[in-house]
Image: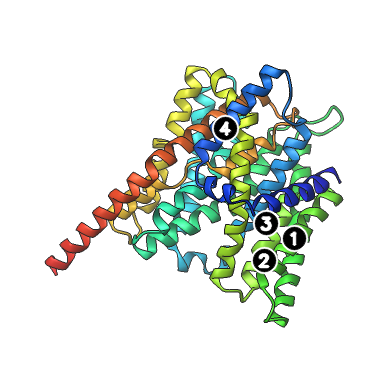
Amino acid sequence: MALAFTALIAAAALAALAKLRLLRSIAGAPVLLLIAGGVTSLFLRALGENFLPPNIISNSAEAGLAALVFASAAQLRVTRFARRCPAAFRLTLGGAPLFLVISSLAAFVLLPQLSFPAALLVGAALMLNGAAFDRRAVTATSAPAEVKATVRTESAAIIAFGAPIAILFAANATAPAASEAPLGPLLSASIHMLQGFALGGSLGYLAALFARRRPRLDGARFAMAAGFLSFALGAIFGVSPVIAAGAASLVWGEQTTASPVARLRIRGMIEKTVAPAAYFLFGVILAPRVFEADMLSVLFAAAVVTVMRAGPRLAMLQSSRLPKESQAFLAWFGGAPGAASALFILSLVDNAAIVDHEAILTVGALSVVAGVFAARLTSRPLANAFLRQTALARRRRMYAG
């Protein structure tokens, strides 16, 4: 009930903030938001005050994560995913799992403060990419249509399909209670996720069915109503609210006749409010932990946002039909931890039952901050260089032909 109430308050607050012109101008400045949050945290610490209670932070982050999962799942039609965007399909079902394995093993080997379940949880959290700010550097240019589609789709798919994996790994890293079986938390989370999928999927199907019978009405509104209701009912009945919201959107996206513009409008409405709030809240709560990290954690964070993310992505794109310059561009451009990673890590703040809890928060904070800085500093120069390379390659092929 507390989670549903928090989600209601957060939704009202974000709806009010969405009308502010200032929010629209800073939505594409995640580095600035992280810094502002960090400065706010230092100021509050100097005054001896806390920003918010840990349970409110976790509940708000879970509500924000559910909104991002919902918006991401709305972009997909699963039965046509592989055919419509094969490069994004490869990155989602090949590159992301490979990154998860490599980053988890690296965390376990490099960081002695992390047990193997905790290392798996760190890898799953960092797998959730899809920061809203970096896509515009490509989608608003004259880049090839297939590259634009890949940039738009793979970030949504990794969030939609990666969130359940991250939730399961969080349960796997949770210490069982005294009277609970060793795999009790994982079994309980699995059952709650299945229940959440059944709840959200049913509501999403009803939303799509009702919208088809009322073609003059905006189908996106029915989807958003189904998503919010799924999250609220999931929180009230004790099933996974994030999975419920995502399932409502995923089933709606499969059954709806809504146009791609309606799907993109859902994503834009949610991202322009949730992402800035996520970065600021992450800066307030966790960014100061960057100064507590040791050298091995810094080395891991630097590797995980560079070679560990680019290598698996490039490997998965080698057999695609994309030109080599597009493969190299997509390998580096995407995959950095973004708002979804930040919100998922924030949702763990109040869960002290997770093994190596403090170490996970510190390593996760450092990696997300490094990922945001790396993506922001390189996205536009990289996109400009890619556009020049593409133009040159097009002229070469034209002269050769």
Return the residue at label 1: 200
Q: CA distance from mark 1 to mark 3?
A: 7 Å
Task: Give the number of the disc on residue 38.
Answer: none
Q: What's the amino acid at mark 3?
A: Gly
Between 307 and 386, which is closer to the camera in this rendering? Answer: 386
Q: Mark 2 and mark 1 in contact (Cβ < 8 Å)?
A: yes
Q: Earlier in the sequence, mark 1 or mark 2?
A: 1
> What is the CA distance from the residue labelled 2 to the residue labelled 4?
38 Å
Cβ atoms at labels 1 and 3 below 8 Å apart = yes
Residue for badge 4: 36
Compared to 398, does 23 lie above or below?
above
Amino acid on which the number 2 mark rests in the picture:
Val
Q: CA distance from mark 4 to mark 3?
A: 30 Å
> Under tag 1, what secondary structure?
helix
Residue under label 2, please give it. Answer: 251
Image point (40%, 38%), residue name: 377
Q: Nearer the viewer, mark 2 or mark 4?
A: 4
Between discs 3 and 2, the one toward the N terminus: 3
